[in-house]
Image (cartoon, grey):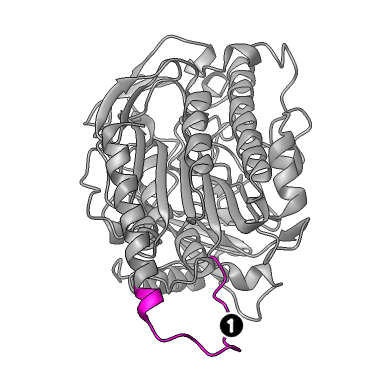
Amino acid sequence: MTVTGVIGWSRLVGAAIVAACVTACSPAPSSDAPVPARPPNIVFVLVDDMRWDEMGAAGHPVLETPHMDRLAREGMRFENAFATTPLCSPSRASFLTGQYAHTNGIVDNTARPSHDLPTFPRELQKAGYATGFFGKWHMGNDASPRPGFTHWVAMPGQGEALDPNLNVDGKALRATGYVSDVLTDYVESFIQRSGSQPFLAYLAHKAIHPNIVQRDDGSLVPVPGQPGGFVAAERHRGRYGQRQMPRRANAFKPPVDKPALLRKIGSLPPLGRETATTDDEMRSRGEMLLGVDDSLGRILDVLERSGQLDNTVVVFTSDHGYFYGEHGLNEERRLAYEETIRIPLLVRFPPKVKPGSVSREMALSLDIAPTLMELAGLAPLPGMQGRSLVPIFAGSPAEWRRSFLIEYFSDTVYPRIFKMGYSAVRTERHKYIAYRELRGMNELYDLQVDPYEEHNLVGTPAGASVEADLQLELRTLLTDTSAGP
């Protein structure tokens, strides 16, 4: 452990001694008073760019994800979980704060101050938790420690797949090994030395993002590696050989009624098969994901060996999805289509979550912070805009959301989607996308009859009957979340 780490742990031990003294000096409770239960540990695992359907438990016929599948068997899988902003930095801020991007101010991937965010780890730390962050902070390239964490292991910017540079409790060092393995080593050590103190281990993987470097202005510089820059651990390379990876029915199909995507932009080719994610890239992503699954298995094992597994809330999710050629798209992400807003979400906690349960309620990235705070016995922060998922663990609640806001603030990283910032509403059946800077290019889909979002209903008789209602619902959501009228 570094000197800084020792100091951090010494402070925690000191705080624990003070708390014990206060308890000892207080009047003794009556003999029939309930003994407070120890708060649960929390392990939060965040994958980068993982689609909701990239695991065996979600029906993927090729990808090997035994530990994710175990988590689904022993906990709850959410079939309808969503990122409210399908972009790395804003999504990460939403998980931490329980707030929309327009509220917490992290609206894109450029360098923005994140030291003052009102995060749930800060509240857990105040409540006596040991809190460790491991991996990709990715709100700016600054990897220095953030408030709310007693132990800090972070990568600058996007991080490297091999021999990653790290900031460990304020000290820069270069690790040796594959990034998912290196981060998991730190997580295991953190859990093993937790002792009787409840802990939060927040693991934000580099995988399955390409091995690139991102400048402060958001521009991306590729680093040579496997197809598409997806670098798997050496032991996993070639695992899928030439296996045929499944694609959705809208893959390779050029958009025909999406005016924003049909704009002629410089010399960019039209969207279609030639612009889609290749089979090699899909296989390389799948092989990179094997390292994430190995990591999850190791964490479950160390919790089980230490007797802490069933008193630990384990959450597994992703910041957003990825295009595999749907509408001819590839790495653009960001857009409000199902492939990028839908995320995997698994929760294991036997005291509250029935094994093998599946929820179809709409769960959001915003919901994680208030959920974990409630499970830790804490009230949500006043500014949180998500809802605790605890009522869903007990069964479908009588009242739950029937719509939610999706937002994206335009940037210049991908020329094809320049000026495609939007506010969108998704209900159980429909989706309406209103572009902020593009006039006459809005989109409306009936997801019940058109799950692949191929037929834009704006301006059609079928759309006329619901468009006004969806516009009103969107305005209501914007007002209710203080995003504007």
Q: Which residues are magenta?
A: 22-38
Tell me if residue 471 comes above or below residue 233 in the rendering. Answer: below
Horizontally, residue 251 falls left or right of residue 410, namely right
Q: Which residue appears at 39% of the width and 54% of the height?
A: 96
Quadrant in the picture for the N terminus: top left
* Tally of numbered discs: 1
Q: Is-magenta flag for residue 127? A: no
Q: Which residue appears at 68% of the width and 65% of the height?
A: 351
Q: Main secondary structure of the magenta part?
A: loop
Q: Quadrant of residue 120?
A: bottom left
Q: Which residue is nearer to you in this view: 215 or 384?
A: 384
Q: Position of residue 338 (x, y in %)?
A: 57, 47
Q: Position of residue 175 (x, y in %)?
A: 39, 19
- Mark 1 nearby-residue class (10 Å; few <14, some 14–19, many ≥20): few
The reply to whether residue 325 is in sight is no
Tell me if residue 325 comes above or below residue 45 in the rendering. Answer: above
Horizontally, residue 296 falls left or right of residue 263, namely right
Q: Quadrant of residue 168?
A: top left
The reply to whether residue 129 is in sight is yes
Q: Position of residue 442 (x, y in %)?
A: 43, 53
Q: Secondary structure at mark 1?
A: loop
Quadrant in the picture for the C terminus: bottom left
Q: Which residue is nearer to you in this view: 17 or 336?
A: 17
Looking at numbered disc 1 in the image, what kind of residue is underneath it?
A: Pro
Q: Which residue is nearer to you in this view: 241 or 432?
A: 241
Which residue is denoted by mark 1 in the rendering?
A: 34
